[in-house]
């Protein structure tokens, strides 16, 4: 990730260590971190207006362990500044011990039992997220927003699979916010490439403690969620043409709303890059 010790394009002082694919900016670790926090904050605020002292839950997924840890840390920083409270929601016995230990250091957790009805194979990412929805209605107290760790890369892969293989996936998970009971399910990283999230984790030292667990945990539902061909397309576009990923997800999300006359100009602003 070293960029020949050129200065950061933002602060102009520290050496650049990472090149952001969607903007071409060369960033130091500090400015990358600050930018990611800002993007997550914008991702939340464009979907839900939180009251002071709001309770925000992060949906931690074993299938997206790095993304879950990064989102939890960033949301903790944001809510600490705004008087909010953070909670972890996770599938019972699904998270590796290293992730439980790290998350439990400062943030309380609630674990649910998630089962596939009439199925023996693993749930896909959309199915995992949707399986939590009924539990939000009966949790016994109000959670203002539930944040998922899905990135732009995830939505691109889901939308592409929906287009080519399974048309129901787009309806099951969309970057748009979804009201469930008194809660709103929000995808605050839907405008962030997966590479940026991993870079944040790398420079924060998160990957060191996860080395023994990542290989066995991080892609558990990969074959169910996307084929290797779709993953290859996603990786190539995110590296060379990330703007096409933004446009693809925006268009795929907007079309159903336009066809049902349910979309508004404000509602169609999905997965737009924020610099």
Image (cartoon, rainbow, N blue to C red):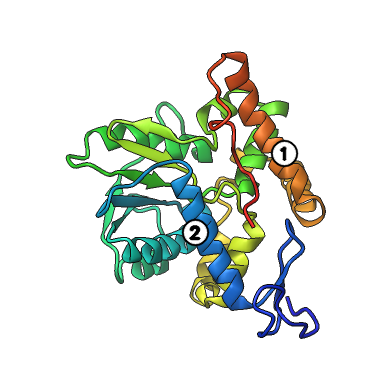
Which percent across, then down, holds residue 154?
61, 45
Which percent across, then down, holds residue 137?
26, 33
Q: Quadrant of residue 49?
A: top left
Q: Give the side of residue 121 with respect to residue 147, left or right.
A: right
Which percent across, then down, holds residue 236?
80, 52
At 17% from the left edge and 39% from the top edge, which residue is drawn? Answer: 140
| Gap in angstroms between the C-alphas marked 1 and 2 | 27 Å
Q: Given this view, does label 1 or label 2 mark the residue nearer the observer?
A: 1
Viewer-nearest residue: 8 or 57? 8
Which residue is disc 2 drawn over? 65
Q: Quadrant of residue 196?
A: bottom right
Circle 1 Cα neighbour tier, 10 Å, few/some/many (<14 / 14–19 / ≥20): some
Q: Give the side of residue 31 with respect to residue 241, left or right.
A: left
Helix, strand, or loop for circle 2? helix
Q: CB atoms at circles 1 and 2 under 8 Å apart?
A: no
Which residue is disc 1 drawn over? 247
Which percent across, then down, holds residue 216?
55, 60
Task: Answer above or below: position of 61 versus 170.
Answer: below
Quarter containing the C terminus:
bottom right
At 58% from the left edge and 62% from the top edge, which residue is drawn? Answer: 197
Task: Answer above or below: position of 191 versus 95.
Answer: above
Q: Quadrant of residue 134?
A: top left
Number of marks in the image? 2
Viewer-nearest residue: 194 or 65? 194
Q: Give the side of residue 108 with respect to residue 35, left or right.
A: left
Q: Which mark is residue 192?
A: none
In the displayed image of the protein, which residue is found farthest to the top?
260
Q: Give the side of residue 236 with respect to residue 121, left or right.
A: right
At 52% from the left edge and 60% from the top edge, which residue is drawn? Answer: 38
Viewer-nearest residue: 113 or 254? 254
């Amino acid at each position: 990730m070293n960029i020949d010790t050129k200065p950061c394009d933002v602060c102009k002082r520290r050496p650049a260590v990472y090149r952001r694919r969607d903007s071409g900016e060369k960033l130091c670790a500090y400015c990358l971190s600050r930018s990611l926090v800002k993007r997550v904050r914008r991702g939340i605020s464009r979907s839900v207006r939180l009251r002071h002292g709001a309770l925000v839950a992060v949906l931690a997924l074993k299938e997206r362990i790095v993304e879950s840890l990064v989102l939890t840390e960033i949301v903790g920083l944001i809510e600490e500044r705004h008087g909010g409270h953070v909670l972890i929601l996770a599938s019972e016995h699904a998270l590796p011990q290293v992730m439980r230990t790290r998350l439990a250091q400062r943030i309380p957790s609630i674990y649910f039992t998630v089962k596939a009805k009439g199925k023996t194979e693993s749930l896909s990412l959309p199915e995992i997220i949707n399986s939590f929805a009924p539990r939000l209605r009966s949790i016994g107290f109000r959670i203002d927003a539930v944040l998922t760790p899905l990135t732009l890369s995830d939505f691109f892969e889901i939308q592409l699979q929906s287009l080519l293989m399974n048309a129901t996936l787009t309806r099951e998970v969309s970057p748009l916010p979804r009201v469930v009971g008194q809660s709103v399910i929000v995808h605050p990283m839907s405008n962030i490439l997966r590479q940026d999230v991993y870079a944040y984790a790398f420079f924060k030292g998160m990957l060191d403690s996860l080395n023994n667990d990542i290989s066995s945990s991080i892609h558990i539902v990969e074959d169910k969620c996307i084929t290797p061909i779709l993953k290859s397309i996603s990786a190539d576009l995110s590296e060379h043409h990330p703007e096409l990923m933004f446009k693809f997800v925006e268009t795929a999300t907007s079309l159903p709303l336009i066809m049902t006359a349910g979309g508004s100009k404000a509602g169609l602003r999905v997965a737009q890059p924020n610099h």
